[in-house]
């Protein structure tokens, strides 16, 4: 590809699909784990399939690395400039992401108070989540809005982006990626040799370093997209993406074996990086007059406000869990084994989409406008994780 040929419509479609996958995963968690029918919700296979919606997370990390690095990659390819205004970059990230994040936490607190009469975590944990440090201690990891752990990791990835950029400048994109790969895998494999208390184990797998490779893979795709890195044809083939994805899914049934878990997320990261490269390559060769289909346009629209969807979906789902438990206990439901929890949680999705669209219009979109007015450098582009 070449500078200026990146189509954000395709990226928005990917973000929309990833956000919807996470929504489906989490309503399955409510229906099968948090508020299941008596004896377990029927159609267990449905729950197993929906659970794979969590793969939206590594996909988000790849897309985030692409979107954040793309403006600077374009600048590097065009002028060789290596001195971005980091102050403006971090101010843009703050206004783009943080005010909606805090507002969504307030919405989550209100919904939980109305639905349950209390909050699931103490105020120190809520404060930790508000300041994006909740992933540093097991008592605050889940907080009011459990999926927000990924946003804390995202903030850490922003903080180390200057390091990644320096690696890409000094060693070019592939050399920088090799260093990130070595650091990520050294940490992930090294955890297998350390006796870590169970409550701390999850934390050590979910901060920037063990997830850095996924983000850096997205940055590599950005460098390729502007012509600053080579990408062999087989690394932008859908069959390569499917092969890596299938291998990652295969590992799901073997993560109990020693050391296997170390490779799962990196494998998924490679799969999604190849998939995104394939999409961008295909878009660059498409007839400019060819209009996307209805589903693609809808996913593209969802992708525009996918951040709002990510912020709001779980608090709304959690607010419906008491209703699921009550309905699941009704004698008629128990007698006939009806999967009411699954039906109710799936039925919340239209409400989740509607509320998220409103949240984008009245909260996220104004913040995007503020972020765009911070500085005037073209080095910082429109992408947002």
Image (cartoon, grey):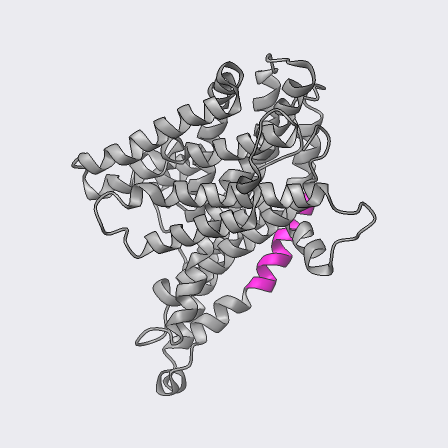
Query: Which of the 4 image quarters holds residue 5?
Result: top right
Q: Residue at x 46, y 19 (%)?
A: 163
Q: Is residue 259 above or below residue 166?
A: below
* Residue 360 on the magenta span: yes
Residue 314 percent across, percent down from the top left: 48, 54
Numbered disc total: 0
Please give left or right for residue 342 compared with residue 20 in the image: left
Residue 278 percent across, percent down from the top left: 60, 44
Q: Nearer the viewer, residue 244 or 184?
A: 244
Q: Is residue 379 above or below residue 1?
A: above
Residue 190 percent across, percent down from the top left: 24, 32
Q: Residue at x 68, y 59 (%)?
A: 295
Q: Is residue 213 above or below residue 318?
A: above
* View extreme (right): residue: 289
Please give left or right for residue 215 compared with residue 236 in the image: left
Quarter the C terminus occupies: top right
* View extreme (front): residue: 233
Q: Nearer the viewer, residue 228 or 88?
A: 228
Q: Is residue 11 visible?
A: no
Q: Which residues are magenta?
A: 349-362
Q: Is residue 84 visible?
A: yes
* Residue 188 on the magenta span: no
Q: Residue at x 69, y 46 (%)?
A: 361
Q: Nearer the viewer, residue 349 or 112?
A: 349
Quarter the N terminus occupies: top right
Residue 180 percent across, percent down from the top left: 41, 27
Q: Residue at x 38, y 83 (%)?
A: 337
Please give left or right for residue 209 compared with residue 270 in the image: left
* View extreme (left): residue: 195
The kind of secondary structure the magenta stretch mainly shows is helix
């Amino acid at each position: 590809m070449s500078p200026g040929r990146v189509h954000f419509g395709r990226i928005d479609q990917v973000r929309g699909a990833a956000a919807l996958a996470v929504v489906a995963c989490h309503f399955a968690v409510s229906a099968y784990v948090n508020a299941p029918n008596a004896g377990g919700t029927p159609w267990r296979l449905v729950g197993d399939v929906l659970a794979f919606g969590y793969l939206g997370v590594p996909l988000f990390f790849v897309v985030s690395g692409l979107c954040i690095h793309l403006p600077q990659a374009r600048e590097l390819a065009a002028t060789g400039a290596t001195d971005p205004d980091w102050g403006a970059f971090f101010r843009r990230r703050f206004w783009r992401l943080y005010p909606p994040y805090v507002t969504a936490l307030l919405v989550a607190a209100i919904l939980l108070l109305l639905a349950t009469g209390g909050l699931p975590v103490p105020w120190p944990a809520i404060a930790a989540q508000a300041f994006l440090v909740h992933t540093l201690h097991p008592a605050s990891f889940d907080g009011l809005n459990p999926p927000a752990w990924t946003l804390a990791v995202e903030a850490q990835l922003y903080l180390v982006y200057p390091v990644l950029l320096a690696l890409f400048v000094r060693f070019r994109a592939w050399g920088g990626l090799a260093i990130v790969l070595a650091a990520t895998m050294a940490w992930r494999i090294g955890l297998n040799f350390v006796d870590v208390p169970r409550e701390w184990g999850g934390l050590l797998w979910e901060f920037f370093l063990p997830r850095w490779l996924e983000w850096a893979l997205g940055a590599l795709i950005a460098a390729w997209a502007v012509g600053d890195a080579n990408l062999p044809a087989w690394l932008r083939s859908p069959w390569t993406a499917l092969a890596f994805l299938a291998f990652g899914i295969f590992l799901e049934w073997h993560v109990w074996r020693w050391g296997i878990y170390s490779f799962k997320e990196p494998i998924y990261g490679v799969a999604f990086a190849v998939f995104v490269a394939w999409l961008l390559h295909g878009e660059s060769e498409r007839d400019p007059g060819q209009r996307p289909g209805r589903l693609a346009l809808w996913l593209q629209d969802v992708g525009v406000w996918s951040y709002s969807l990510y912020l709001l979906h779980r608090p709304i789902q959690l607010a419906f869990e008491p209703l699921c438990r009550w309905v699941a206990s009704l004698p008629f439901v128990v007698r006939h084994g009806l999967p009411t929890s699954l039906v109710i949680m799936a039925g919340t999705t239209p409400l989740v989409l509607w509320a998220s669209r409103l949240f984008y219009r009245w909260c996220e979109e104004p913040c995007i406008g503020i972020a765009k007015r911070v500085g005037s450098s073209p080095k910082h582009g429109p992408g947002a994780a």
